Amino acid sequence: MPVPISVTGFKNLAGDQNVHAEIAETASAGDWFSKMRGGGDVEKTSTTATMDVDDETATTTTATHDENGKLWGIAVNDLDFSYPGIDGAPIPGSEPLIKGMNLHLKPGSCCLLLGANGAGKTTLLKIMGGKHMVPREKVLILGREAFYDTSLTSSGDLSYIGGNWQRDVAFAGYNIPLAGDFPASKMLDGIKGVDPARKKRIIDALDVDVEWRMHQVSDGQRRRVQLAWGLMHEFKVLLLDEITVDLDVLGRAELMKFLRQECEERQCTILYATHIFDGLEKFASHVAFVAGGKLQFCKEMESIPSLKSRKPGALLKEVEIWLREDARLRPRKKKTVRKSLEQARNNGWGEGRLGSTLAKGEELRNGISQIKNASNAVMRC
Ligand SMILES: Nc1ncnc2c1ncn2[C@@H]1O[C@H](COP(=O)(O)OP(=O)(O)OP(=O)(O)O)[C@@H](O)[C@H]1O
């Protein structure tokens, strides 16, 4: 039977320099938590927040259902993921960004997804949101395949709110804030089949003025409209990626209160990636921590001693310790000597098809590449 992860143990070890020195030498990205805990099986214990670890329940949970035969809100089953290179295949020799990840959340869970910059939180949320193709059954939302079952999003059962509301505009640039000379009401009234009482509740909670002109709003006001728009349908699973970044303190508090109510009253599943912790002690039912491409743990707030009391500021202190441990144990990348320019790739502006517009080494030096003279060719060292 796997050894359950103890977050307390992790915290206690945080002050022990000798233990760390030893672990830092021996731990690899994927197993540092288990090394700290004397070799416990991290993979199997990573779902203990939602699955009991005793043998009896372990045999009754499945990829789609929990031990009580109920559908998981979110189920990630042994997921591997790498971003593809220009040819659509994983870049040879590169480590997968996500390695054998498992995460299972029951309906009614309000889970914070935490980890260092670049840990893969956004990527994981996007995969759950059906934005990246992964093998069937690896990521199931309400028992349905995230990428393949488009009715998940079209029905409103799954809502993903992340990043800024922006788009690429030809001849203007990338990431131009979504704006237009029309009122916020035009966006919000455009959503069909919304209960008017719910609409009013959301607009009130986010303090949206439906008269706001979308080309004149501030970043925070645009964010409020974006959130109102994303929350309007009665979602069953909600994925949030750092959505409170532009909100003032009151806006954030009201939003968190609304989301918590949604979880409790309608038994939704919410997964929220963030680095902003103020006021979140009361919001979350679970905390999940990602590092080294893996889910290191997913625990109920009550099971983490320092978070049990839900004292304001407790989360920030605790997460800082986890992040410091992560930084300390993360394997250092070997410095590589940069070679002279030997590869150029077409970013779409060079003429010809993909194969003919890729040039490498000798070819490039001899000027054979068709994209050599393209004004917008991307040069790589
Ligand atoms: N489209 C992409 N193609 C290739 N690599 C990518 C792409 N998007 C992200 N990455 C890489 O994947 C890694 C994880 O990125 P991701 O945005 O998922 O991290 P994150 O945990 O959300 O970070 P942050 O806390 O900074 O938002 C990063 O190293 C990033 O460079």
Image (cartoon, rainbow, N blue to C red):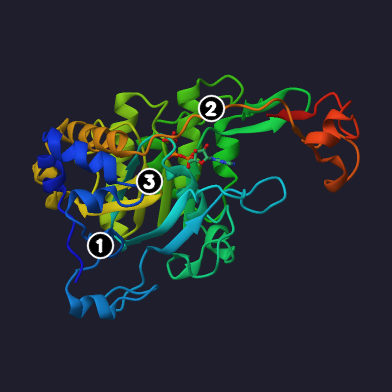
Indicate left or right for 283 with 357 as reference.
Answer: left
Is any part of residue 234 visible from this angle?
A: no
Q: Give the crowd class for mark 2: few <14, some 14-19, many >=20 residues within 10 Å.
A: few
Indicate left or right for 309 with 265 as reference.
Answer: left
Front-most of residues 126 and 9: 9
Q: Give the crowd class for mark 1: few <14, some 14-19, many >=20 residues within 10 Å.
A: some
Q: Are marks 3 and 1 in contact (CB under 8 Å)?
A: no
Give the amino acid at mark 2.
Glu
Front-most of residues 375 and 228: 375
Marked residue nearer the N-terminal end (2 or 1): 1
- Give percent across and percent down for residue 175: 63, 28
Front-most of residues 324 and 76: 324
Q: Which mark is residue 292?
A: 3
Q: CA distance from mark 2 to mark 1?
A: 55 Å
Image quadrant assignment for residue 359: top right
Residue pictured at 45% horizontal, 52% vertical:
98
Marked residue nearer the N-terminal end (3 or 1): 1
Marked residue nearer the N-terminal end (2 or 3): 2
- Give percent across and percent down for residue 223: 48, 31
Determine whether 242 is above or below 263 in the image: above
Q: CA distance from mark 3 to mark 1?
A: 15 Å
Q: Which mark is residue 41?
A: 1
Image quadrant assignment for residue 86: top right
- Give percent across and percent down for residue 149: 57, 66
Count of numbered circles on the image: 3
Label 1 secondary element = loop
Residue pictured at 65% horizontal, 33% vertical:
167
Q: Which mark is residue 211?
A: 2
- Give percent across and percent down for residue 378: 75, 29
Indicate left or right for 33 with 241 as reference.
Answer: left
Is any part of residue 141 visible from this angle?
A: yes
Give the amino acid at mark 3.
Gly
